[in-house]
Image: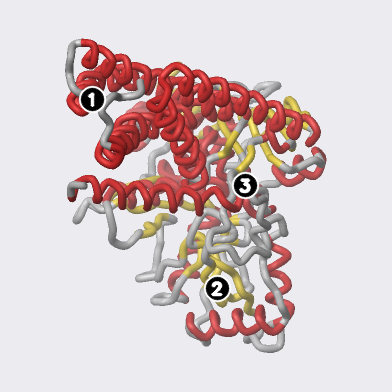
Amino acid sequence: MSKTWWTKCVLLIIFVFTSAIYITPTFLNLDPQKTKFIFKQKINLGLDLQGGVYMVLGVDFKKVYTEVVARIADSLSEDLKSKNILCGPVQILKGNEPSDDPKINMECTTPDAKQNAYKLIKSNYDNLRITNEKEKSYQFGISKLYKENIREKTISQSIEVIRNRIDEFGVAEPVITSQGTDRLSVELPGVKDVERAKDLIGRTAKLEFKIVDETKNQDEVAALVSETEAKNNLEYKEGDKFSDFVKKINTLLKDKLPQNTEIAFEREGIKQTSGRIPYLLKSKVEVTGDDLKDAFVQFDPQNNRPEVGITFNSKGAENFDKVTGDNTHKRLAIVLDGIIHSAPVIQTRISQGRAQITLGTGDHSDLIKEAKDLSIVLRAGALPAQLDFLEQRIVGPSLGQDSIQKGKLASIVGCLAVFLFMFIYYRTSGFIADFSLCLNVLFILAILVGMEATLTLPGIAGIALTVGIAVDSNVVIYERIREELRSGKPPKAAIDLGFDKAFRTILDANVTNAAAAFVLLNYGTGPIKGFAVTLLIGILTTLFTAVFVTRFVFDWYMEKIEVKELSI
């Protein structure tokens, strides 16, 4: 055998061995908390397979717009006063109900004051539009573009708040998506109590700023926490409430910590079960999310590096000025729902109610994503939206189990029918195709585990469809080989020509399938996305198994068996 063949052989063995390790916990139903197997991750089952709670929540944007306009009115009043422009008061036009287009009214004492106010608004408030003008007054509304921006931010913020609550509760693989322009759908696999889930989601995110106590360094705090966990056999397990775990840690360490301090954790990953970095914080809350006006992504003008800009209301600006002035060169922890999201060093006193959170060094696109995520987290405490529960229902576990069994049965019967047809119609070559199909399914399941994707009932249908697509690729190859054999080519040459000529057809067919799957992935929701994900993965594995694996086995078959007449 050639060196190239042995390279392919080693590569295939590595792929098969790795895939087998990845799917073993799922097929043997191993308990991740008890098993000693080297790999513990299992395939996550969606709501339709595992059962749980499904909810639809509506966002009241009339209230959101009214709150935004009220903050703009306060800010404009302060700016007019600071520049000695004789206009005011700046007030929201009151109505009986919150409006989806609230207005600000501003009265000025003189024409000059009115003109100066107009210049100020044009230069600093490009998010406003003039809706009415009188001799000494203006009426403003927020612009259409800014309303769209508010809507997008509010939806992102609401999703972040809900996800924080669900993560804190320990639910594995929740699905939280937007529906239309003012609704959110929430799927909580494994949760059966609707009222408990509503209470969990309905709370407002709690944002706090606390000073890091540096009487103990980071290593000492980490060692103290590890020692306490080991001595008391304390371990956070998925499904437990993370705040209860933190409370136990602080209770056990009460006599070993400095007075008026507490332990909090910064997560290294998204999940609670990922790495956690302990911090010792002062218990006193210096500034809260109630004092935050806005958070947004901006760029450092000197190096164009992304950072997070934050602004406070008048009370928050005063408190933040005092805190930063009294604690220069100390670390200020930003805590959301008891979890530390950032702990930057205070470089200097921060006045004027504005601050920047730098993100260090790294890949520019990763820093932008981190800045966006952090700004959403900060806004989650500053701009809570009114969420109304519009729909809720329980998907019972019996339905999920029934779906699993029927999905398994349908997939097995379909696959067996395909395997039997290929073996009867193409004989030995059909057996080789069946072998590549088995590896195809193995690779799909392993990739689903590796990506921590959620398997839904439509996802199972996607796997079954992938088997059909893969068979189609084998049929195209085999019919090409048959044509070459009929034209008088020897078996080895017929195989080489058959694979070469069929490749373009197979590639074209899979590219068109992938295009359709991408459309479903981008514009579909929930189960449709589950189908698209497995279909896309299946297309990639199909190209690999149909072209690479099948060709590899044929090369071995022709060399080792010394075939005179190809069984096809």
Task: State the separation of the CA atoms marked 2 and 3.
Answer: 36 Å
Colour scheme shown: secondary structure
Q: The residue under label 2 is which amino acid type?
A: Pro
Q: The residue under label 3 is which amino acid type?
A: Phe
Task: State the separation of the CA atoms marked 3 and 1.
Answer: 40 Å
Q: Kindly identify which residue carries mark 2.
A: 278
Q: Kindly identify which residue carries mark 1.
A: 491
Q: The residue under label 1 is which amino acid type?
A: Pro
| SS for callout 2 | strand
Up the image or down, 256 lies above or below 486; here it is below
Q: Whole-percent x and y of residue 283?
A: 63, 73
Please state which of the two labelled residues, at mark 2 or mark 3, is closer to the viewer.
3
Count of marks overlaid on the render: 3
Q: Residues within 10 Å of mark 2 (few under 14, many from 20)?
A: many
At a point 46% along the width and 67% down the height, the residue shown is 343
Q: Whole-percent x and y of residue 316?
A: 53, 57
At a point 35% along the width and 29% down the height, the residue shown is 546
Precedes in sequence: disc 2 or disc 3: 3
Please state which of the two labelled residues, at mark 3 or mark 1, is closer to the viewer.
1
| SS for callout 3 | helix
Residue 362 falls left or right of residue 131: left
Q: Kindly identify which residue carries mark 3.
A: 27
Q: Whole-percent x and y of residue 383?
A: 57, 42
